[in-house]
Amino acid sequence: MSEQPDPFDEIVDTETDRDPDLAVIEAGSRTLRTQAGPPTGDPVPARPADPEVDKALRAVEADLATRWGETKLEPSVTRIAALMDVLGEPQRAYPSIHITGTNGKTSTARMIEALLAAFDLRTGRYTSPHVQSITERISLDGAPIEAERFIETYDDVKPYIEMVDGQQEYRLSFFEVLTGMAFAAFADAPVDVAVVEVGMGGSWDATNVMDGSVAVVTPIDLDHTDRLGSTTAEIAVEKAGIVKQGATVILAQQPVDAAQVMLKKAVEVDATVAREGMEFGVVSREVAVGGQLVTLRGLGGEYEEVFLPLYGAHQAHNAAVALAAVEAFFGVGAGEARTLDMDTIRGAFASVASPGRLEVVRRSPTVVLDAAHNPAGARAAAAGVTESFGFSRLIGVVGASGDKDVRGFLEAFEPIFAEVVVTQNSSHRAMDADDLAAVAVEVFGDDRVVVEPRLDDALEAAITLAEEESEFAGAGVLVTGSVITVGEARLLLGKG
């Protein structure tokens, strides 16, 4: 009798040359009863209800706004290292999992956080940018830090920030100050483990003053090419900077040149590498009501029928990366072949939310938000929408930043958008709606492009276009192009 093939052997080949479309597995009419209920409440905080607290938070935001924004950089860790020194090195008070990559960092961080919390560890999570509230960036115990605590943390570190400002050629930037606040808040809590996402790159990112015992690298693609490099290999060199001596590297599926860079860095620092498609991966996935049902191969074994309340093949792969990272943190795979408790893993994944990532915020017609802002993210979102929603007609609302590959972004959505409403958000980085329209017309044709410079008008126009097919025709709206566009649309649509 011939031996049955190991399902995981099959993913080694498919993962090596993965196309998101090839990962789609039709589920027919199958539905799912999850082991844990969906998350309760909105994971994105609203403005503080107390007028005095709101006033104090706005004062902190205004103070932070006087500093270099996140797109203005002087590539070094000199200033943040000086701040950590005067604060007493708070980033060394707890073990950390450090996350870099181009796309999927925040969703992966949220999954890692949920898994660690399910095993009764107190977590701190630092991610960027925020969807609606600056307090989202610093989370304790799975929830954004309270506004009062955010203000207190800023007040506590402000004297030290001013001290460092006076000693350096340039003042600490907006991102550097927030990074310092996060590390201080985590030490003060105190947390058992910090899950920290880089802001940009890795080597000279402000978060790189910590030593993550686990370094996670989500898929690398072309973004921020003016600062990180024009090829995925050059970008990987910067991102490899988070890999520290003796760490474990969890490597998502990568372009060949990027993978080579990462493996070379791992050898240089004697790090252990676990590769998606080799040591771990997605064995199978099926569309399910409210998300998907996945079977994951971890470092220590297989985890069957795990419900993930997020849409798209890319989120299943993020889940595999997150699981491997947590296993590595617990020492699984380092000569220890065992799985973590199955029910705990299932419950943790079932509780995950990732605001602004194929997030449904309205029905009749269905309005979905996705913070994709580069071609790779757009391709993943387009595949996820096509697979999970089955819209008879989809209207896009796009507000992008001027420093992105807008043409490549729009080309990824062209096959699935019946029409696109181009607009702009309130950021100074926003691409002018008319300039965006000029590119959109070249991609979609004049008859498929509508221009509405105000986001509220753009949403209304898109919903009207979707409703033209009647209430029960299955048309939908996808709002995308920027985290800022998604955050502002979320507020306009009554979330937060």
Image (cartoon, rainbow, N blue to C red):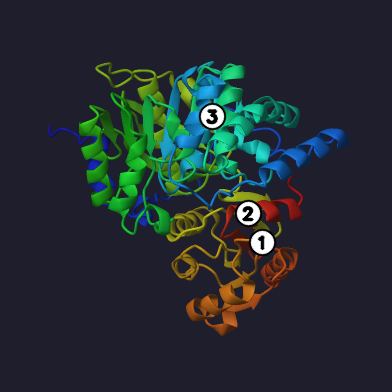
Query: Mark 2: which secondary structure?
Result: helix
For discs 3 and 1, the disc positioned in front in the rendered view: 3
Query: Mark 3: which secondary structure?
Result: helix
Q: Position of residue 348 (x, y in %)?
A: 52, 27
Closer-to-camera residue (323/436) = 436
Q: Amino acid at mark 2?
A: Ile
The crowd level at tag 3 (other Cα within 10 Å; few <14, some 14-19, many 20+) is: many
Does residue 439 appear in the picture of this structure?
yes
Q: Position of residue 467 (x, y in %)?
A: 71, 68
First reached walking from the N terminus: tag 2 or tag 3 = 3
Rendered residue at 45%/24% (across/down): 96
Q: Amino acid at mark 3?
A: Leu
For the image, the number of numbered tags is: 3
Residue 291 appears left or right of 50: left
How far apart marks 2 and 3 lie (CA) works out to: 29 Å
Rendered residue at 20%/36% (across/down): 5
Residue 232 appears left or right of 112: left
Tag shown at residue 83:
3
First reached walking from the N terminus: tag 3 or tag 1 = 3
Q: Are marks 2 and 1 in contact (CB under 8 Å)?
A: yes
The crowd level at tag 1 (other Cα within 10 Å; few <14, some 14-19, many 20+) is: many
Q: Position of residue 234 (x, y in %)?
A: 30, 52
Tag shown at residue 484:
2
How far apart marks 3 and 1 lie (CA) works out to: 33 Å
Q: Is residue 472 above or below residue 342?
A: below
The residue where tag 1 is placed is: 425
For discs 2 and 3, the disc positioned in front in the rendered view: 3
Q: Amino acid at mark 1?
A: Asn
